[in-house]
Amino acid sequence: MKLHHLRNATFVVETGDHHILIDPMLGAQGTLPPFARLRHKAAKNPTVALPDNASQLLGRVTHCLITHCQKFGLRALQHTDHLDGPGAKFLKSNDVPVVCPVQDAAFLRGLDLTVGTTLEYWSSEPFLGGEIVAVPARHGHGWVHNLMANGAGFFLRLPDEPSLYISGDTVYTEDVKRALVELKPDIAVVAAGGASLDVGGLILMSAEEVLEFVREAPGQVVANHLEALNHCPMTRVELAGLLGEAGLSDKVLLPEDGEMLLFGEGGSG
């Protein structure tokens, strides 16, 4: 299995002839407004461009997983850091089948996307000869999560590949711990940017929660959702320092935009 990290939470899982796109935010640098203006520097998003190899990888995409994208069915509340306008256009023009939580299916069909598998929490569904399970994701601490798009993480078990858990945008919960302890993923991808809005608590895991996630993970961890959005202050260097202090550096990979990670025989995992 290969993981091609593009930017933020957007990456491609390569398995055999399949290339699975995760959470496509494909717009140019600075084409979206700031997601916070008071707590963080009011820079336009995304704050970095897609890597040079993005077009080549996108040309191979066969499927797409979207962890979350909407709240109350309103396009004004669309989570554009996981599905922006160019991302939706790409999926539509290439008729890419989308897998999503059941609560997002109507919204995505309203964008004229091809919705294939829809997932209920903790229910296993067939996927590419293996299985996929949706894990509840709570997008924030305290009351703020009620304003957010509470979506899902995904656990994938595919033939002849390491198992993979993608946390999605979530804080650390009993469901997240259950996914790590009971499903025992060989690879776990964690959204580690420490995001917050101008009101309320963190909407992603705190640094302490990310460390707990890493401790509970049975295998290799990949940290993403870093250095691409103005409301995500955690940097790779800062996270690497925290991991080093906790004695967890060997367990976590911090890919650069455009980097490929290889897992399995001869790989990282």
Image (cartoon, rainbow, N blue to C red):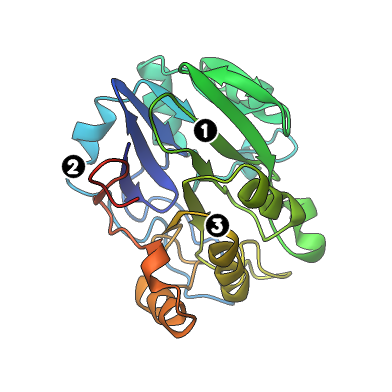
Q: Is residue 5 left or right of residue 199?
A: left
The foreground one among 95 and 249 is 249
Q: Is residue 66 visible?
A: no
SS state under label 1: strand
Residue topped by disc 3: 217
Q: Residue at x 71, y 70 (%)?
A: 201
Q: Residue at x 44, y 52 (%)?
A: 32
The foreground one among 125 and 205 is 125
C-alpha span from label 1 to label 2: 25 Å
Label 2 environment density (alpha carbons within 10 Å; few <14, some 14–19, many ≥20): few
The foreground one among 156 and 167 is 156
Q: Nearer the viewer, mark 1 or mark 2?
A: 1
Residue topped by disc 2: 53
- Which of the image's four quarters has the N terminus? top left
Q: Are marks 1 and 2 in contact (CB under 8 Å)?
A: no
Q: Is residue 126 visible?
A: yes
Tell me which amino acid carries mark 1. Leu
SS state under label 2: loop
Q: Position of residue 204 (x, y in %)?
A: 61, 62
Q: Quadrant of residue 101?
A: top right
Q: Nearer the viewer, mark 3 or mark 1?
A: 3
Residue topped by disc 1: 156
Q: Nearer the viewer, mark 2 or mark 3?
A: 3
Q: Position of residue 187 (x, y in %)?
A: 45, 48
- Sequence-earlier tag: 2 or 3: 2
C-alpha span from label 2 to label 3: 30 Å
Image position of 259 with respect to 228: above or below: above
Tell me which amino acid carries mark 3. Ala
- Sequence-earlier tag: 1 or 2: 2
Q: Residue 25 shows which numbered tag?
A: none
